[in-house]
Image (spheres, rainbow, N blue to C red):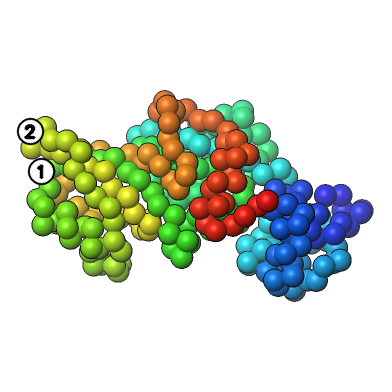
Amino acid sequence: MESEAPQRVQKVLAAAGIASRRAAEQLIRDGRVTVNGRAVELGARASSSDTVAVDGVTIETGAPLRYFALNKPVGVVSTVSDPQGRPTVLDLLGEELGDARLFPVGRLDMDSTGLILLTNDGLLANRLLHPGYEVSREYLLEVEPVPRSGDLAALRKGLVLEDGDTGPARVSVLSRRGNRAQVSMSLHTGRKRQIRRSFAHLGYSVVSLSRVRFGSLGLGRLEPGGHRELTGEEVRELYRRTGWETD
Protein backbone atom coordinates (compact mmCIF):
# COMPACT_ATOMS: atom_id res chain seq x y z
CA MET A 1 0.00 0.00 0.00
CA GLU A 2 1.57 3.36 -1.07
CA SER A 3 1.31 6.21 1.42
CA GLU A 4 0.67 8.82 -1.29
CA ALA A 5 -2.37 6.95 -2.55
CA PRO A 6 -4.84 5.92 0.19
CA GLN A 7 -6.87 2.87 -0.78
CA ARG A 8 -10.27 1.58 0.19
CA VAL A 9 -10.03 -0.37 3.42
CA GLN A 10 -11.48 -3.55 1.91
CA LYS A 11 -8.70 -3.47 -0.69
CA VAL A 12 -6.11 -2.99 2.06
CA LEU A 13 -7.41 -6.08 3.89
CA ALA A 14 -7.51 -8.14 0.71
CA ALA A 15 -3.95 -7.11 -0.21
CA ALA A 16 -2.80 -8.13 3.28
CA GLY A 17 -4.26 -11.59 2.72
CA ILE A 18 -6.77 -11.26 5.55
CA ALA A 19 -9.85 -11.87 3.42
CA SER A 20 -11.21 -11.65 -0.09
CA ARG A 21 -12.61 -8.27 -1.15
CA ARG A 22 -16.16 -9.50 -0.58
CA ALA A 23 -15.37 -10.96 2.84
CA ALA A 24 -13.53 -7.77 3.82
CA GLU A 25 -16.60 -5.71 2.91
CA GLN A 26 -18.68 -7.88 5.23
CA LEU A 27 -16.18 -7.37 8.05
CA ILE A 28 -16.59 -3.62 7.60
CA ARG A 29 -20.39 -3.87 7.56
CA ASP A 30 -20.23 -5.89 10.78
CA GLY A 31 -18.27 -3.12 12.50
CA ARG A 32 -15.20 -5.28 13.06
CA VAL A 33 -12.71 -3.05 11.21
CA THR A 34 -11.13 0.09 12.62
CA VAL A 35 -8.71 2.66 11.24
CA ASN A 36 -6.73 4.51 13.88
CA GLY A 37 -9.06 3.16 16.54
CA ARG A 38 -12.35 4.17 14.92
CA ALA A 39 -14.85 1.86 13.23
CA VAL A 40 -15.18 2.55 9.51
CA GLU A 41 -17.88 2.17 6.91
CA LEU A 42 -17.69 0.95 3.32
CA GLY A 43 -15.90 3.51 1.20
CA ALA A 44 -13.42 4.50 3.90
CA ARG A 45 -9.78 4.72 2.86
CA ALA A 46 -6.48 4.13 4.62
CA SER A 47 -2.83 4.81 3.88
CA SER A 48 0.36 3.14 5.05
CA SER A 49 0.60 5.61 7.95
CA ASP A 50 -2.78 4.49 9.30
CA THR A 51 -3.33 1.67 11.79
CA VAL A 52 -5.84 -0.83 10.43
CA ALA A 53 -7.23 -3.45 12.81
CA VAL A 54 -9.72 -6.31 12.67
CA ASP A 55 -11.35 -7.45 15.91
CA GLY A 56 -8.86 -5.23 17.72
CA VAL A 57 -5.79 -6.87 16.17
CA THR A 58 -3.52 -4.63 14.09
CA ILE A 59 -3.02 -5.82 10.52
CA GLU A 60 0.43 -5.76 8.93
CA THR A 61 -0.17 -3.73 5.76
CA GLY A 62 3.37 -2.72 4.85
CA ALA A 63 4.84 -6.17 4.21
CA PRO A 64 3.62 -9.44 2.70
CA LEU A 65 2.29 -11.98 5.18
CA ARG A 66 4.49 -15.04 5.56
CA TYR A 67 3.97 -18.36 7.28
CA PHE A 68 6.55 -21.02 8.17
CA ALA A 69 6.30 -24.40 9.86
CA LEU A 70 9.46 -25.24 11.82
CA ASN A 71 10.58 -28.33 13.73
CA LYS A 72 12.18 -26.91 16.86
CA PRO A 73 15.04 -29.00 18.25
CA VAL A 74 16.10 -29.24 21.88
CA GLY A 75 18.19 -26.29 23.08
CA VAL A 76 16.47 -23.64 20.96
CA VAL A 77 14.20 -21.04 22.58
CA SER A 78 10.90 -20.14 20.93
CA THR A 79 11.27 -16.37 21.18
CA VAL A 80 12.36 -13.69 18.70
CA SER A 81 15.46 -12.86 20.77
CA ASP A 82 17.22 -14.10 23.89
CA PRO A 83 19.17 -11.96 26.38
CA GLN A 84 21.32 -14.98 27.28
CA GLY A 85 22.43 -15.42 23.68
CA ARG A 86 20.82 -18.81 23.19
CA PRO A 87 19.74 -19.77 19.65
CA THR A 88 16.15 -18.83 18.79
CA VAL A 89 13.64 -20.27 16.35
CA LEU A 90 14.19 -17.24 14.09
CA ASP A 91 17.91 -18.06 13.88
CA LEU A 92 16.97 -21.37 12.24
CA LEU A 93 15.40 -19.56 9.27
CA GLY A 94 18.72 -17.97 8.37
CA GLU A 95 18.74 -15.79 5.26
CA GLU A 96 15.21 -16.88 4.39
CA LEU A 97 13.94 -14.67 7.20
CA GLY A 98 14.98 -11.54 5.31
CA ASP A 99 13.33 -8.39 6.63
CA ALA A 100 10.15 -10.16 7.71
CA ARG A 101 9.22 -9.43 11.32
CA LEU A 102 8.10 -12.93 12.20
CA PHE A 103 7.15 -14.24 15.62
CA PRO A 104 6.26 -17.69 16.97
CA VAL A 105 2.60 -18.54 17.53
CA GLY A 106 2.70 -20.02 21.01
CA ARG A 107 5.80 -21.48 22.58
CA LEU A 108 7.62 -24.68 23.38
CA ASP A 109 10.04 -24.77 26.28
CA MET A 110 13.73 -25.19 25.51
CA ASP A 111 13.71 -28.92 26.35
CA SER A 112 10.74 -29.67 24.07
CA THR A 113 10.72 -30.22 20.32
CA GLY A 114 8.33 -30.10 17.43
CA LEU A 115 6.04 -27.87 15.44
CA ILE A 116 6.28 -24.10 15.72
CA LEU A 117 4.32 -21.77 13.43
CA LEU A 118 6.19 -18.57 12.57
CA THR A 119 4.35 -15.67 10.94
CA ASN A 120 3.83 -11.91 10.87
CA ASP A 121 0.05 -12.36 10.68
CA GLY A 122 -1.16 -11.04 14.02
CA LEU A 123 -4.81 -11.74 13.30
CA LEU A 124 -4.25 -15.44 12.62
CA ALA A 125 -1.95 -15.78 15.63
CA ASN A 126 -4.52 -14.15 17.89
CA ARG A 127 -7.31 -16.43 16.71
CA LEU A 128 -5.23 -19.62 16.91
CA LEU A 129 -4.26 -18.89 20.51
CA HIS A 130 -7.63 -17.58 21.70
CA PRO A 131 -9.21 -20.25 23.94
CA GLY A 132 -12.66 -19.41 22.59
CA TYR A 133 -11.81 -20.94 19.21
CA GLU A 134 -10.61 -24.20 20.78
CA VAL A 135 -7.83 -24.87 18.28
CA SER A 136 -6.20 -28.12 19.36
CA ARG A 137 -2.50 -28.85 19.83
CA GLU A 138 -1.36 -32.45 19.68
CA TYR A 139 1.76 -33.75 21.43
CA LEU A 140 3.70 -37.00 21.66
CA LEU A 141 5.52 -37.55 24.92
CA GLU A 142 7.42 -40.19 26.81
CA VAL A 143 6.32 -40.49 30.42
CA GLU A 144 7.81 -42.32 33.40
CA PRO A 145 6.38 -44.41 35.03
CA VAL A 146 3.51 -45.77 32.91
CA PRO A 147 0.40 -43.68 33.73
CA ARG A 148 -2.36 -45.33 35.71
CA SER A 149 -5.87 -45.38 34.25
CA GLY A 150 -7.22 -43.21 37.06
CA ASP A 151 -4.62 -40.52 36.38
CA LEU A 152 -5.37 -40.60 32.65
CA ALA A 153 -9.03 -40.05 33.52
CA ALA A 154 -8.04 -37.07 35.68
CA LEU A 155 -6.07 -35.55 32.80
CA ARG A 156 -9.03 -36.04 30.46
CA LYS A 157 -11.31 -34.25 32.89
CA GLY A 158 -8.83 -31.48 33.66
CA LEU A 159 -6.63 -30.62 36.62
CA VAL A 160 -6.45 -27.59 38.88
CA LEU A 161 -2.86 -26.30 38.94
CA GLU A 162 -1.46 -23.25 40.71
CA ASP A 163 -2.43 -20.99 37.80
CA GLY A 164 -5.94 -22.39 37.33
CA ASP A 165 -7.91 -25.13 35.61
CA THR A 166 -6.13 -26.84 32.72
CA GLY A 167 -9.36 -27.78 30.99
CA PRO A 168 -10.10 -31.19 29.48
CA ALA A 169 -7.61 -33.04 27.28
CA ARG A 170 -7.55 -36.09 25.05
CA VAL A 171 -4.96 -38.53 26.40
CA SER A 172 -4.08 -42.08 25.42
CA VAL A 173 -1.18 -44.48 25.95
CA LEU A 174 0.20 -45.56 22.57
CA SER A 175 2.83 -48.04 23.74
CA ARG A 176 4.75 -49.24 26.78
CA ARG A 177 8.40 -50.14 27.18
CA GLY A 178 9.67 -51.08 30.59
CA ASN A 179 8.73 -48.37 33.06
CA ARG A 180 7.98 -45.80 30.36
CA ALA A 181 5.04 -45.12 28.06
CA GLN A 182 4.58 -43.20 24.82
CA VAL A 183 1.55 -40.96 25.28
CA SER A 184 -0.53 -38.89 22.87
CA MET A 185 -2.11 -35.75 24.31
CA SER A 186 -4.30 -33.09 22.68
CA LEU A 187 -5.49 -29.93 24.37
CA HIS A 188 -6.89 -26.49 23.52
CA THR A 189 -4.95 -24.43 26.04
CA GLY A 190 -1.27 -23.63 26.18
CA ARG A 191 -0.13 -22.39 29.56
CA LYS A 192 3.58 -22.36 30.32
CA ARG A 193 4.90 -25.92 30.65
CA GLN A 194 1.32 -27.08 31.18
CA ILE A 195 1.83 -30.69 30.11
CA ARG A 196 4.99 -31.18 32.17
CA ARG A 197 3.37 -29.57 35.21
CA SER A 198 0.20 -31.64 34.81
CA PHE A 199 2.10 -34.92 34.83
CA ALA A 200 4.36 -33.76 37.66
CA HIS A 201 1.24 -32.90 39.65
CA LEU A 202 0.23 -36.56 39.37
CA GLY A 203 3.69 -37.89 40.20
CA TYR A 204 5.11 -38.54 36.71
CA SER A 205 8.16 -37.34 34.83
CA VAL A 206 7.97 -36.24 31.19
CA VAL A 207 11.14 -37.59 29.60
CA SER A 208 10.51 -36.05 26.18
CA LEU A 209 7.80 -33.92 24.59
CA SER A 210 7.16 -33.02 20.96
CA ARG A 211 4.32 -31.06 19.37
CA VAL A 212 3.20 -32.85 16.21
CA ARG A 213 0.11 -30.83 15.23
CA PHE A 214 -1.34 -27.36 15.67
CA GLY A 215 -4.90 -27.14 14.39
CA SER A 216 -4.87 -28.42 10.81
CA LEU A 217 -1.09 -28.06 10.46
CA GLY A 218 1.00 -31.18 11.01
CA LEU A 219 4.73 -31.59 11.55
CA GLY A 220 4.99 -34.03 8.65
CA ARG A 221 8.50 -35.07 7.68
CA LEU A 222 10.35 -31.96 8.78
CA GLU A 223 13.72 -32.86 10.26
CA PRO A 224 14.78 -31.24 13.56
CA GLY A 225 15.77 -27.66 12.73
CA GLY A 226 14.08 -27.86 9.34
CA HIS A 227 11.40 -25.49 8.09
CA ARG A 228 9.12 -24.88 5.13
CA GLU A 229 6.78 -22.14 3.97
CA LEU A 230 3.06 -22.90 4.17
CA THR A 231 0.88 -23.10 1.09
CA GLY A 232 -2.04 -20.75 0.60
CA GLU A 233 -4.49 -23.57 1.22
CA GLU A 234 -2.77 -24.48 4.50
CA VAL A 235 -3.13 -20.88 5.68
CA ARG A 236 -6.79 -20.75 4.67
CA GLU A 237 -7.46 -24.00 6.52
CA LEU A 238 -5.85 -22.63 9.69
CA TYR A 239 -8.19 -19.65 9.45
CA ARG A 240 -11.16 -21.97 8.93
CA ARG A 241 -10.28 -23.83 12.13
CA THR A 242 -10.97 -20.55 13.95
CA GLY A 243 -14.28 -20.02 12.16
CA TRP A 244 -12.87 -17.42 9.76
CA GLU A 245 -13.60 -17.70 6.04
CA THR A 246 -11.08 -15.85 3.88
CA ASP A 247 -13.00 -16.47 0.64
In the image, 27 versus 229, the foreground residue is 27
Which residue sits at x=57%, y=29%? 94
Q: Residue 65's x, y, as percent?
A: 67, 44
* Circle 2/circle 1 CB separation < 8 Å: no
Q: Residue 151, position in %: x, y?
A: 13, 56
Q: For the residue marked with disc 2, what is the amino acid?
A: Gly
Residue at image point 30% right, 64% down = 167
| Residue 155 position in % (x across, y down) | 21, 57
**Mark 2 or 1 closer to N-term?**
1
Q: In the image, residue 25 lies at what x, y percent?
A: 76, 62
Left or right of residue 162, residue 34 in this image:
right
Residue 110, image quadrant? top left
Quadrant of residue 202 within the rendered picture: bottom left
Residue at the extreme left of the image, as rendered = 178
Q: Nearer the viewer, residue 117 or 149?
A: 149
Instruction: Using a 10 Å C-alpha cutoff, classify the residue at mark 1 as few (fewer than 14 neighbours), some (14 to 19) or many (20 or more).
Output: some
Question: Element at badge 2?
Answer: loop
In the image, residue 246 above or below residue 141: below
Q: Is residue 81 above or below residue 164?
A: above
Q: Nearer the viewer, residue 44 or 79?
A: 44
Residue 229 lies left or right of residue 26; in this view the side is left
Residue in view at x 21 percent, y 46 percent: 172
How many labels were placed on the picture?
2
Instruction: Give the residue number, with chain letter if any, for mark 1.
Output: 145
Amino acid at circle 1: Pro
- Helix, strand or loop for disc 1: loop
Quadrant of residue 146 within the rendered picture: top left
Residue, disc 2: 178
Visible in this render: residue 201?
no
Q: Is residue 149 visible?
A: yes
Categorize mark 2 by other alpha carbons within 10 Å: few (<14), some (14-19), many (20+). Answer: few
Q: CA distance from mark 2 to mark 1?
A: 9 Å
